[in-house]
Image: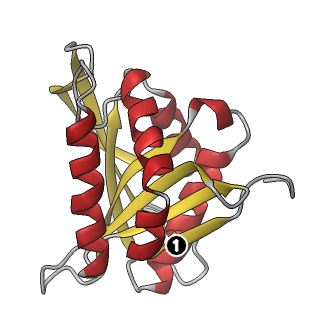
C-alpha cells in the first residue's frame, strides 16, 4: 500500500458503532455488487443493520475481531473479520470472513493489505491455521490464491448469489508460522 491509502486498524465495539453508517454502506455495496456474502436481493436494510449489531455483540464478547481500512477519519473503505475458534481442541484455528472492499476503493491493493493484516493479527493471537471460503471464480478467489492460500475443495451450489443464482464455493486454508510465512502441507517437501 502507498502512504496515501487508509491505515488498517482493529475496531472496538465502540468504534464499530461510531462507523455504523459506513460499515452498513460497505456491506450493502458488496450485496448490490452481487457478492456472495450471505444475502439475496432485494437488499434488506434491516438485515444488514442486524448483522452489524450481531457482529458488534460478538466483538464485545471477544468472539470476533474486525479489522478495517478507513479513508480519512470517517469512511470505512474495507474490512475483514477474524473469528477465532472457541473449541477447546482448536485454540490454534480461526476463520477469516467478510473480506469487503467498497467498489470506490478497489484496485489499490486494499484487499491484499487487509488479508496481510488479518493474518498478522491471527498470528499475534496464536492462531496459526486459518480457513475461509469464497465464491468459485471470484476476484477474491484469485486474491487468496496469490496470497498463498491452499484450496481444499469446491462445493457445487453451496450458496446463492444475491441475484439468486446458485454459486459454487471454494474452501481454503493457510498455515502461518512465527514469521507469518505459509507452511507447506504435511507430507509436502
| Outermost residue toward the right in this view | 3
Q: Secondary structure at mark 1?
A: strand
Answer with left or right where residue 31 lies relative to residue 100: left
Coloring scheme of the render?
secondary structure
Between 58 and 175, which is closer to the camera in this rendering? 58
Find disc 1 in the rendering and name its residue: 10
Residue 5 spot, x, y in % from top left: 78, 52
Answer with left or right where residue 157 lies relative to residue 60: left
Q: Quadrant of residue 58?
A: bottom left
Residue 121, compared with residue 39, is above or below; it is: below
Residue 38 spot, x, y in % from top left: 23, 37
Which residue lies at the image location 12% right of the left edge and 86% below the top edge? 88
Residue 32, compared with residue 70, is above or below; it is: above
Total labels: the figure holds 1
Residue 110, compared with residue 131, is above or below; it is: above
Residue 37 spot, x, y in % from top left: 31, 37
Answer with left or right where residue 134 lies relative to residue 21: left
Q: Is residue 129 among the parts visible in the rendering?
A: yes
Q: Is residue 186 among the parts visible in the rendering?
A: no
Between 75 and 131, which is closer to the camera in this rendering? 75
Mark 1 Cα shell of 10 Å, populated few (<14), some (14-19), many (≥20) = some
Which residue lies at the image location 26% right of the left edge and 32% below the top edge? 169
Which residue lies at the image location 50% right of the left edge and 48% below the top edge? 22
Q: Quadrant of residue 32?
A: top left
Which residue lies at the image location 34% right of the left edge and 38% below the top edge? 134
Residue 100 spot, x, y in % from top left: 47, 43
Amino acid at each position: 500500500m502507498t502512504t496515501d491509502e487508509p491505515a488498517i486498524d482493529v475496531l472496538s465495539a465502540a468504534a464499530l458503532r461510531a462507523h455504523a453508517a459506513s460499515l452498513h454502506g460497505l456491506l450493502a455495496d458488496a450485496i448490490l455488487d452481487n457478492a456472495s456474502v450471505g444475502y439475496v436481493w432485494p437488499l434488506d436494510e434491516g438485515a444488514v443493520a442486524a448483522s452489524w449489531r450481531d457482529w458488534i455483540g460478538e466483538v464485545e464478547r471477544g468472539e470476533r475481531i474486525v479489522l478495517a481500512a478507513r479513508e480519512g477519519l470517517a469512511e470505512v473503505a474495507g474490512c475483514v473479520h477474524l473469528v477465532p475458534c472457541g473449541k477447546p481442541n482448536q485454540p490454534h484455528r480461526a476463520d477469516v470472513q467478510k473480506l469487503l472492499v467498497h467498489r470506490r476503493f478497489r484496485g489499490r491493493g486494499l484487499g491484499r493489505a487487509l488479508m496481510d493484516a488479518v493474518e498478522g493479527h491471527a498470528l499475534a493471537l496464536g492462531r496459526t491455521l486459518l480457513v475461509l471460503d469464497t465464491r468459485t471464480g471470484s476476484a477474491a478467489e484469485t486474491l487468496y490464491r496469490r496470497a498463498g492460500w491452499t484450496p481444499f475443495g469446491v462445493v457445487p451450489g453451496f450458496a446463492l448469489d444475491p441475484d439468486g443464482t446458485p454459486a459454487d464455493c471454494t474452501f481454503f486454508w493457510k498455515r502461518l508460522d512465527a514469521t507469518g510465512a505459509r507452511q507447506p502441507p504435511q507430507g509436502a517437501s
